Image: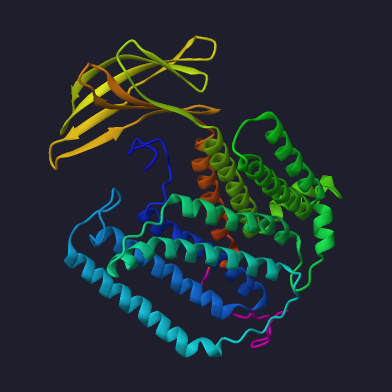
Amino acid sequence: WSYYVLGWGGWWFWDPVENASFMPWLAGTALLHSAIVVEKRDTMKSWTILLAILTFSLSLLGTFRVRSGEQTAVHSFANDPTRGVFILVLLVIAVGGSLGLYAVRAASLRPTGMFSPVSRETSLVLNNLVLAVAAFVILFGTLYPLLAKEAGYQVSVAAPFFNIVFPALMALLIPVMGVGPLLAWKRGNLREALRRLSPALLLAVLAALAVALLSHGPFWAPIAIGYGVWLTASVLTEFAGRIGLVRAPGQALRRAVGLPRGAWGMTIAHLGIAVTLFGIAVSSAWQQGKITVIEPGDGVSVGGYRFVLDAVGPIRGPNYMASRATFSVYGRDGDFLLRLTPETRQYFSPPQETTEAAIRPRATGDLYAVIGKAQSDGRWGVRLYYKPLVSWIWIGALIMVFGGAVSLSDRRLRVGAPRAKRPAVSGAAGVPAE
């Protein structure tokens, strides 16, 4: 929505309401991974229940932010304080009641499983630690300005803070994502896992060096690409070892078909994270754009493409008036490629002005055009971008969703009532047959 509707060219701004939707995702991801430890090793039970409470609480907090009128932003959907009071009361009851029950019963949830410092359980504990810290940092950065305002101070915690802290936390998490699945439960062999992952590490280093030598992006771009290659290669290495692709290639397909769907879901979801990481890194590091003022007939070159403003004219919609621009886009060789028709709309009821960006996804990136305000001299403000691989962000998210759906379809996760079996009876009455 931020990318397609607002027309500012970006897809994430660390807006307080965006953060409110992101925090339960982080806590819920930690919850899913801690639940695996509970299932396998009968430990981390207390922590898992606390994560479940916090995940739901963060969801309610997001509802309060967007429905209470507590703040005015593009993501706010209400300005009714009465509704905000009702949601706040619901938040206090749900969170306070849940945490109260947890405080009473947490001591009875004693762990029974033990594991060594080098094990899959430890990798999942590190996973939980990083995700929980990330959620807390975002919660702190989101609520601190509000608390400071109540104390009489004006403080702003914006994108620069989050863009430093959050990538640093993810830089700790991604290596664990590669190594953890290769460790055994209870007691793992870190040296053997690293040996198996040495080709993945080599590929990641070579990819980072190639990007650093051949491109002119920011300093962090080669590091991000290296992390993406590491995660992709390590996930595929773990999957290949699970199905015996190297030691018994003739049986690999049969083993792949027989894998639990939870294993398939893990592989798919982690690959989705790698795809999203590539999309974020490439689109952020190498996007090109221009914000300028032109008149019909003028052209602007962006990212090797030439955008020519053909015309701007009024159109009428069912409940709005709009100014629609027509851009002809030409390729690097000068050939005509396509047309883009962005709009600026003025709605009647309620009175509101919106931007309809014209976006054409392509295999290598998106062509993005926005028409702005008319100038007194007949020129128009325009915003033009070339965004390489930005669609991979959405594709990666869809892959993650698909991986989660595959995991949830695992037979072990279905709950059903047991059926009582009737003993079969042989010729002699009352004697059960074997």
Identity of the residue furthest to the left in this view: 349
> Any magenta on residue 425?
yes
Colour scheme shown: rainbow
| 59 lies left or right of 162 | left
Spot occupied by residue 370 in the image (x, y as percentages of width and height)? 34, 28
Relative to the observer, which residue lies in front, 172 or 264? 172
Q: Is residue 128 above or below residue 43?
A: above
Spot occupied by residue 10 in the image (x, y as percentages of width and height)? 42, 39
Q: Which residues are magenta?
A: 415-434
- The reply to whether residue 418 is visible in this rendering is no
Q: Is residue 375 above or below residue 164?
A: above
| 13 lies left or right of 87 | right
Q: Residue at x 53, y 57 (%)?
A: 165
Q: Is residue 88 above or below residue 389?
A: below
Image quadrant occupied by the C terminus: bottom right
Q: Is residue 409 above or below residue 351?
A: below
> Any magenta on residue 147?
no
Image quadrant occupied by the N terminus: top left
Identity of the residue furthest to the right in this view: 247
The answer to which quarter of the image holds residue 342 is: top left
The answer to which quarter of the image holds residue 30 is: bottom right
Majority SS type along the magenta span: loop
| 249 lies left or right of 10 | right
Q: Residue at x 24, y 62 (%)?
A: 68
Q: Residue at x 70, y 55 (%)?
A: 178
- The reply to whether residue 26 is visible in this rendering is yes
Q: Residue at x 25, y 62 (%)?
A: 70
